[in-house]
Image (cartoon, rainbow, N blue to C red):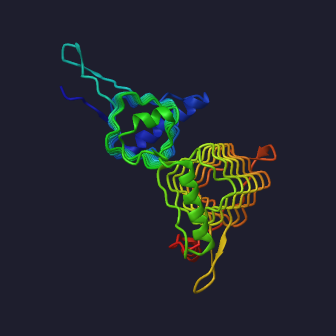
Amino acid sequence: MAREFIRIDSAALLEIAARHGRFKLGKPGGARANFAHHDLSNLSIEGLNLSGADFTGARLQNLNARRSNLSGAVLYAADMRSCMLQEADLTRADLRGCCLRGADLSGARLIDADMREGALATQDEKGELTQIAPNRVELVVANLRGADLSRVKFAGGLAVQVDLTDAVLRGAKLSGVDLRNSNLTGVVLEDADLTQANLSGSILHGAVLTGAHLGQANLAQADLLGAILDRSGREAGRNALNAVQPLEIEPADFEKIIQAHEEWVGSSGRQGKRLELSGVDLSRAALAKRNLSGAVLACCVFSGTDLSGTRLILANLSFADLRNVDLRGADLRAATLRRAFLSGADLSRSHLSTLAMAGARSHRRSANLDRARLWRATLRGADMSGAILTGADFDGADLADAVLADADTRGAKMSGALAFGGKFEPETPRPFSAAAERERAPRPEPVA
């Protein structure tokens, strides 16, 4: 028996929303919004506060719910295909059994949301109830870029080809979830339960998987380039693409490689050999106070390494794992640290400023920390003048006496940063300039 829906227009929708607002404020004439089994397809609730409203079994296809407040709302078994939920608040929402195929949830908040399977019951002419087969939540080809799904319950869900770029899923329940061929670039999966999850063919570039439970997870053909893993995670992903490899070189031979690179730097490339490693574990290497300028060390692991006083001018450290690394006084001018993981690193008095480059016309090249994560990092007295900090995350970082003059902080997360024991107040981001952007764009590296 086909489900019947109650169709309403925009005027009726807004009147119900107004009564819901009065209900939330405890004013006379208020009533909780009840859209159960209603058809709101192609309507708009953009920016409205409908927290706690009932949308059970509703048809919400192509609904414009951008920046709406749906926290605690009941969306049980709702049809939300192609729903526009950018920056919407769905904290603690009941999304069991709903269909979000093709929905846009970029920047949305789904903290503690319940996305387990759910089912409705239909009533026949005799009044007898028949339960429809349980439906698992469907996020196929949905957009969840930058969404916060911390502690979400999504076990057994279907999320094939979903875009979770830079989404946060700390402590999420994702056991048995199907994430085949999804984009999980930069996703935070700390302490998430991914047991028996299907991650085959997924892109996990720079994903943070520390503390994640990956027992019996399928990582076949998953791309772990620059992914941050603990020991158990590395074991689970040993057959994935771009998994970190141990440094299978004797210490004496590795020292010769470093000396050859320093000779290459000192001779402007005429002698020696440039250091070029990718996806290698260098966490036990002795590199303090060495000259690694111009080295290519993308996706390498330096966890806990002493790099104090090391010269890393123009070095490529994109997607590098620099957890708890000692970088005090390091020279990182014009270095590339795109999506590098610097949680707990000590960059006190480090140099992350621009570098004058010789050429047909003089120009300066900036240190690039685009989307780098500097959680709880120490940056006391660090010079980041002119640095590219777009999308960088400074949550809990100590920026006392740090210099950020002319730094590009568009999209940077600095609200949780500290300075002098108090909240850090960043300067107003400089306006976008196409000419300046061309000047700061990465260029072919000259011989150091």
The picture places residue 294, in percent across and down from the top left corner, at 57, 66
Residue 425 visible in rendering:
yes
The residue nearer to you, when weighing 43 against 411, is 411
Q: Position of residue 370 (x, y in %)?
A: 56, 58
Q: Where 156 falls versus 310 (above or below)?
A: above
Left or right: where 128 falls relative to 60: left
Would you say 165 lies left or right of 406 here? left
Q: How many marks?
A: 0
**Residue extending furthest toward the bottom:** 360
- The quadrant of the rendering that contains the C terminus is bottom right
Residue 446 place in picture, x, y as percent: 55, 75
The residue positioned farthest toward the front in the image shown? 252
Q: Is residue 261 above or below residue 134?
A: below
* Residue at left offset 57%, top offset 30%: 24
**In this orientation, which residue lies closer to the viewer: 27 or 83?**
83
Residue under the point 52% across and 48% down: 250
Is residue 78 visible in the rendered structure shown here?
Answer: no
Q: Compared with residue 327, is residue 121 higher up or lower down, i.e. above or below?
A: above
Above or below, comparing residue 12 to residue 402 in the picture = above
Residue found at the very far right of the displayed protein: 420
Q: Residue at x 24, y 22 (%)?
A: 132
Q: The N terminus appears in which quarter of the rendering?
A: top left
Residue 198: x and y in percent read 33, 35
In terms of image quadrants, where is residue 330?
bottom right
